[in-house]
Amino acid sequence: ETGVTQTPRHLVMGMTNKKSLKCEQHLGHNAMYWYKQSAKKPLELMFVYNFKEQTENNSVPSRFSPECPNSSHLFLHLHTLQPEDSALYLCASRPSGGGTDTQYFGPGTRLTVL
Amino acid sequence: SQQGEEDPQALSIQEGENATMNCSYKTSINNLQWYRQNSGRGLVHLILIRSNEREKHSGRLRVTLDTSKKSSSLLITASRAADTASYFCAPFHSNYQLIWGAGTKLIIKP
């Protein structure tokens, strides 16, 4: 248990659905990340938030829309996804500053797009 | 590509043997981290080695770093079945991002 939770753990959706992934951390961290992990590929950084401000958007298609209402919560809103978007979506958090570069990961949401 | 690249891609050994995984990267780094991922789960931080360190130990883990060769190795001694997982190296780049590879899948046979 790392202190980062993600819901739901599994999600199956059609290409026309709209759904949201939720991430919550209770570690007092100020930086939060969304990653996409596809089979046999490196982790792909999608979005980074520092103190609720988006500091990185790694050329992610607009069908993925992040939201960070406060430092403890991070959402990923999904709409009109494609089958190739099926993957494990991981949320991570990290303390900002203080020289600690370790990231703490949630268990992930396994997304299947039909 | 700035990825950390792990080698080998897969490794299968007998329980009790030592497992060695290697990592190479391309750019200057502040530190390099190793993470473990059990199947379909999130990643767990194992150990961090700073750019001015050459070797670091944590329990059965030993990490080395050679900045001149831009490479690192992770040694797991006296492997156990519970060590079965994927292992990732993540060089921490100066732009404050971790650069991920595809990982080494380690299988420990009983």
Image (cartoon, rainbow, N blue to C red):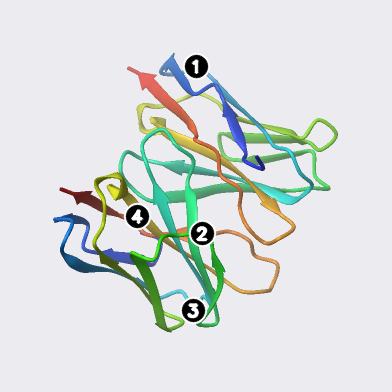
Mark 1 chain: B
Q: Position of residue A101 (x, y in %)?
A: 63, 61
Q: Which of marks 3 and 4 precedes in the sequence?
A: 3
- In the rendered structure, are the residues bearing label 3 and label 1 in contact, judged by CB atoms less than 8 Å apart? no
The residue positioned 62% from the left and 41% from the top of the image is B3
Corner quadrant of residue B107: top left
What secondary structure is found at the residue carrying circle 1?
loop
- Residue A28's tag is 3
Alpha-carbon distance for marks 4 and 1? Answer: 33 Å
Which amino acid does the dot numbered 1 rest on? Glu
Q: Is residue B36 left or right of residue A12?
A: right
- In the rendered structure, are the residues bearing label 2 and label 1 in contact, judged by CB atoms less than 8 Å apart? no
Specify whether residue A37 is in view. Answer: yes
- Residue A59's tag is 2
Q: Is residue B67 above or below residue B98?
A: above
- Residue A89's tag is 4
> Mark 2 or mark 1: which is in front?
2
What secondary structure is found at the residue carrying circle 2?
loop
Mark 3 chain: A
Q: Is residue B99 above or below residue B107?
A: below
